[in-house]
């Protein structure tokens, strides 16, 4: 029997109530049996106590980080939680204000069945039509690409974090070799797959890859 791929959506909060997170509220509305929401709370004040009381156990898993430990440590903590999951499962990194829609998962699920690819990156257009992400990193600043099909050398590949989806096997060896130190996305972008989905999020057109 073919194994069903599980999806782990990781959202990091900082001094914000769970119910005020646009990302969490949208994720909780999706009808995805294989979607698991993990909230990591970097809050440093009374929000922590309120968040601990608020979260619905059946819809998400909540973890207080004990203060603002930064994104890298929070991400590593998430990976430690997922270390025993199937290497074919997908972790999706989100900021706390992305109005993610059902179309995102419809596109993503259609593409992850191809095991050739490990990393799925959103392509973001600004209102001026310029592709802001991904881009080619430079010595001082990144260089914009002209189309999603443009090739970027993997050692210069740069992309935003939110909506980045990664097959867990991309992290397995890295965590062993580096003893769980802060993850670096540039080390993990093995193979990139592009696919397109038009959405309007906060005045921006997102193409999901």
Image (tube, grey):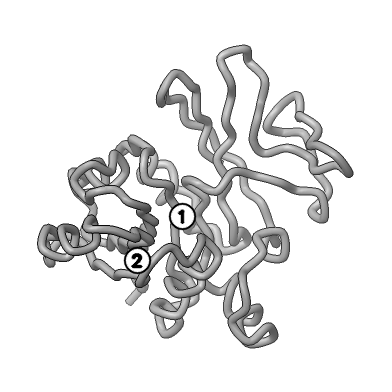
* Quadrant of the image containing the C terminus: top right
Question: What is the x, y in percent for residue 54?
Answer: 11, 58
Rendered view: 39 above or below 173 = above
User: Dividing the picture into quarters, in which one does residue 130 lie?
Assistant: top right
* Quadrant of the image containing the N terminus: bottom left
In this view, the residue in front, 116 or 171, is 171
Q: Residue furthest front?
A: 45
Q: Residue furthest top?
A: 128
Residue with the mark numbered 2? 6
Question: What is the x, y in percent for residue 86?
Answer: 43, 78
Q: Quick check: 139 left or right of 27? A: right
| Residue 137 is at least partly visible in this image | yes
Q: Crowding near pointer 1: few (<14 within 10 Å), some, many (20+)?
A: many
Instruction: Calculate the distance from the C-alpha at mark 2 to the C-alpha at mark 1.
Output: 14 Å
Residue with the mark numbered 1? 93
| Residue 7 is at least partly visible in this image | no
Q: Crowding near pointer 2: few (<14 within 10 Å), some, many (20+)?
A: some
Decide: marks 2, 1 in contact (CB < 8 A)? no
Rendered view: 47 above or below 162 = below
Label 2 vs 1, first from the N-terminus: 2
The residue lying at 38 percent from left, 61 percent from top is 42
Describe the element under mark 2 as helix, strand or loop.
Answer: loop
The residue lying at 23 percent from left, 49 percent from top is 17
In this view, the residue in front, 71 or 43, is 43
Q: Quick check: 140 left or right of 61? A: right
């Amino acid at each position: 029997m073919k194994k069903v791929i599980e999806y782990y959506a990781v959202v990091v909060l900082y001094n914000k109530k769970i119910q005020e997170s646009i990302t969490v509220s949208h994720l909780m509305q999706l009808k995805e049996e294989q979607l698991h929401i993990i909230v990591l709370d970097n809050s440093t004040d009374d929000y922590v106590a309120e968040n601990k009381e608020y979260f619905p156990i059946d819809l998400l898993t909540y973890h207080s980080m004990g203060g603002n430990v930064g994104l890298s440590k929070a991400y590593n903590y998430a990976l430690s939680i997922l270390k025993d999951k199937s290497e074919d499962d997908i972790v999706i990194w989100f900021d706390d204000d992305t109005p993610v829609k059902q179309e995102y998962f419809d596109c993503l699920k259609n593409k992850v069945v191809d095991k050739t690819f490990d990393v799925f990156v959103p392509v973001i257009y600004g209102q001026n039509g310029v592709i802001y992400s991904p881009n080619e990193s430079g010595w001082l600043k990144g260089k914009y690409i002209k189309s999603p099909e443009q090739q970027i050398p993997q050692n210069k590949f740069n992309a935003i974090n939110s909506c980045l989806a990664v097959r867990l096997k991309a992290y397995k060896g890295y965590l062993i070799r580096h003893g769980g130190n802060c993850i670096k996305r540039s080390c993990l972008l093995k193979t990139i797959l592009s696919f397109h989905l038009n959405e309007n999020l906060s005045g921006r057109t997102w193409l999901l890859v």
